Amino acid sequence: MGTDTLGIEPPPSYEAATGQAPHELVEPASLVLHGTDIVVENTGEDTPLYQLSRNIKALPPKNNSSSIHLHRVERGASEKTNGQLVTTHLFHLVHPVNADFRNDLPPYYVTATSFEALGNIILEANKHTLQRTEFRAKLSRDTNSGTKPLFHAKDKQQLVFCSKNSRKGEQKWLDQHGKLLATECHNDQLPTLKMETPVPRNTRDALVAMWCMMLWYELAESRGAKRERKCSPTLNVAKMSS
């Protein structure tokens, strides 16, 4: 690995640090959200597979936090990082403040912060049912958090995932071809994403991000959150100026 103009060696790439490629297939596993950690179920491993910068299932102070960071945590397998924890910042998860009164940004989306990520993705509420809202995830390929604009034109965005409700009250996550990728359920009251088939590592990263965004949507659109927004001075100012 070379050095930059200041003679400082840049950090190793993900593949160099972990010995794994972003397109490498990962085997199915059940991922459980426990606070800010997403852990693999029934492994006895204390280290989370993913981490969030805050609890996505709890309202932040004054309901005004607009961004959450999603990281992947793995043990390195390269000569330099063998056995060490390697943390990769994958996405900013974003729900803009006063999203209901803005037309410059989608209300729920993620922006890529890692070169391995698929790109920026919008989460759209597709269909409201008696059970739960169903969703579509629209990918702007080859974009990241620094891209301007953040998203391609609508006709250039690609459907990458969608969710469908099942009769059991679970949500099935499908790819753009209708193939089942994962099932979302609750084990011991903890949100769980059960991966059903091997997928590339960066596809699982994106699906986990969309799952987290869905959980954020369900919290932010709950009656309690809406009541709190009505009492927010920031929101009242937005209404007066709209």
Image (cartoon, rainbow, N blue to C red):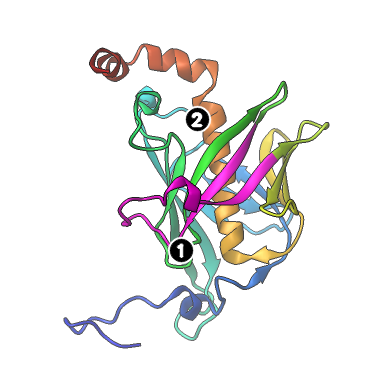
- Using the image as rendered, state which of residue 93 and residue 134 is in the foreground: 134
Q: Nearer the viewer, residue 217 or 81?
A: 217
Q: Is residue 205 left or right of residue 93?
A: right
Would you identify the image quadrant in which residue 50 lies?
A: bottom right
Q: Residue at x 46, y 27 (%)?
A: 59
Q: Residue at position x 39%, y 12% from top?
A: 230
Judge by depth and name the residue closer to the eye, 23 or 49.
23
Q: Position of residue 174 (x, y in %)?
A: 70, 49
Q: Quadrant of the C terminus?
A: top left
Question: At numbered mark 2, what does the secondary structure look like: helix, strand or loop?
Answer: loop
Q: Secondary structure at mark 1?
A: strand
Residue ranking furthest to the right: 167
Question: Measured from the top left, where is residue 64 in percent x and y?
Answer: 35, 28
Tell me: residue 26, above or below residue 97. below
Where residue 87 is drawn, which disc sits there? 1
Which kind of residue does numbered mark 2 sit on? Ala
Taking the magenta stretch, the answer to whether it contains residue 159 is yes
Q: Residue at x 42, y 15 (%)?
A: 228
Residue 21 screen position, x and y as percent: 56, 75
Read off the magenta span: 134-163
* Image quadrant assignment for residue 54: top left
Q: Are marks 1 and 2 in contact (CB under 8 Å)?
A: no
Residue named by callout 2 = 58
* Magenta span includes 213: no
Indicate the amino acid at tag 1: Thr
Asked whether residue 49 appears in the rendered view, the answer is no
Within 10 Å of disc 2 (Cα), the crowding (few <14, some 14-19, many 20+) is: few
Give x and y (percent) for residue 70: 47, 51
Residue 96 visible, this orientation = yes
Quadrant of res 10: bottom left
Left or right for 141, reference 49: left
